[in-house]
Amino acid sequence: MERLSLADAIREGSKTSAHVQFYFVRPRPASEPFAFEACALGAAAIGIGQPELGLDETEGTYFDLFTGVWPELGNEGVECPIPDCHHFICDLYSCITHLNDDHNWTREAIADWLDTITVQIPATVHQEASV
């Protein structure tokens, strides 16, 4: 089965979770309309049916867990798309977190932005896949 793009996974997860800042995935009370609330990356995890990626770090850091699914999240040199933002140039993972938490972008807006940028998957991923 082909993996969903990061943008599409965010869109899928956004359909079944509420937006939250400063958490990847957080359970909600049973009385709430959605079982989880999630940031953009958490919505991506929910979108591929793996909300546990954002619930805890028992298997490694969040960065490692998410880049294990979407290696492009580790790509450096991504600049915040907000004009005059003084956020440093960083990896894609950090920029998405920055847009969600610091600029309060919707998850759908982040997914739309992802569609406008070209992100190369690191060469090491292609080498591993061809072995």
Image: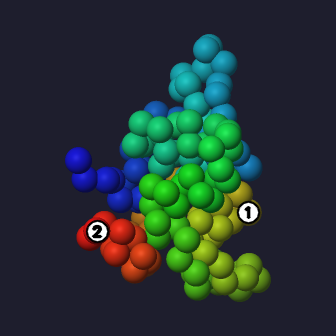
Callouts 1 and 2 close, C-beta under 8 Å: no
Identify residue for label 2: 131
Residue lying furthest top in this view? 31
Residue 105, how many percent across, how many down? 61, 59
* Secondary structure of the residue carrying numbered label 1: loop
Location of mark 1 (residue) = 102
Q: Earlier in the sequence, mark 1 or mark 2?
A: 1
The residue furthest left is 1
**Front one among 116 and 72:** 72
The C terminus sits in image quarter: bottom left
Residue 90 percent location from the top left of the image: 65, 79
Q: What colour scheme has been applied to the protein in the rendered image?
A: rainbow
Q: Is residue 120 visible?
A: no
Q: Is residue 60 left or right of residue 22?
A: left
Amino acid type of the residue tagged 2 in the rendering: Val
Q: Nearer the viewer, residue 42 or 85?
A: 42
Q: Residue at x 53, y 37 (%)?
A: 51
**Residue at the spot 53% in from the left edge and 77% down from the top edge:** 75
Residue located 41% across and 59% down the image: 7
